[in-house]
Amino acid sequence: MRKLNFRRNPQAGQRLRRLALGKSGWRTPLALGGSALALSACNVTDFGMHTGATTQGHDIFSLYQTFIYMVIVVAIVTFGGLLYVLVRFGRKNGDKVPRQRHSNVKIEIVYTVIPAIIVAAIFFMSVGTENKVDAVSPNPSLNLTVTAFQWGWRFTYPNGVSIVSQGQNYPQMVLPEGETTKVKLVSKDVVHGFYVAAFDFSRYALPGVTNYFDLTPNKLGTFVGRCSQLCGLYHAEMLFSVRVVTPAQFTAWLNSQGKGATA
Ligand SMILES: [Cu+2]
């Protein structure tokens, strides 16, 4: 096979470089990368995850953050060890193959026991957080029924106030900050998913199954909600939002809504 000779055509490399980077050379990609970094104004230690706008979501976030810290330590030890071995014991000119051994029981015990401890720690931390997040309060401040259907949502408050999707008029759930809302989640037809990214929370809405969960918002604001299960033709229209207000604002809002009102 003939060897490729780039030296024979020095312009080709130049042309390829211009094609990939444009006239401005490296300035454009550098500027784009810089502005992307500037735009993602989130904390580095969030590791790209929502910090959780509910106490439950924050527990999930803390678990995730702990896992990432563990990953960093393991990566430093592993890659550090690998690098050390490569540098320290890499074959140099004139080196003979060193004495080979079949096993080293002590080292094997260490590198079996340590990962086992890490996996056990991850397991028990996960179970603890899951139990905490899934715990449903016996006396919540508010009981809210969320009904998923093809293709929308109905939020029913205890006093009969009902907020429902109407075509592209997406419904908004209003929740009081710092108070626990117990949500009863049902589906009228197929499998849907109640998903609020900022809450780090998603739960199936299953036909014939009633799911209960608590939401205790700890941040004021409006958050985007979605159906997280492909549930048919207009799945993409199953949008909603969650607005977290102070308890006083919440009471005022609830009283201002007529029975059976839609928003
Ligand atoms: Cu859906």
Image: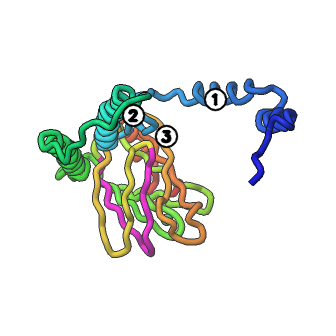
Which of marks 1 and 2 precedes in the sequence?
1
Q: Amino acid at mark 1?
A: Gly
260 and 242: which one is in front? 242
Marks 3/1: CA–CA distance: 29 Å
* Percent of width and height locating residue 33: 64, 29
Q: Which mark is residue 222?
A: 3
Secondary structure, mark 3, is strand
Residue with the mark numbered 1:
33
Mark 1 neighbour density, 10 Å: few (under 14) some (14–19) many (20 or more): few
Q: Is residue 235 rendered to the left or right of residue 76?
A: right
Q: Amino acid at mark 3?
A: Thr
Which residue is pictured at 44% across the width and 75% down the height?
A: 189
Marks 2/3: CA–CA distance: 9 Å
Which stretch is magenta? 181-197
* Percent of width and height locating residue 102: 19, 48
Q: Is residue 196 magenta?
A: yes
Q: Is residue 229 magenta?
A: no
* Percent of width and height locating residue 236: 58, 61
Q: Is residue 164 rendered to the left or right of residue 217?
A: right
Residue 21 appears in the picture as rendered: yes
Marks 2/1: CA–CA distance: 31 Å
Which residue is pictured at 16% across the width and 42% down the height?
A: 104
Secondary structure, mark 1, is helix
| Tag 2 and tag 3, C-beta contact below 8 Å | no
Q: Which mark is residue 219?
A: 2
Residue 178 appears in the picture as rendered: no
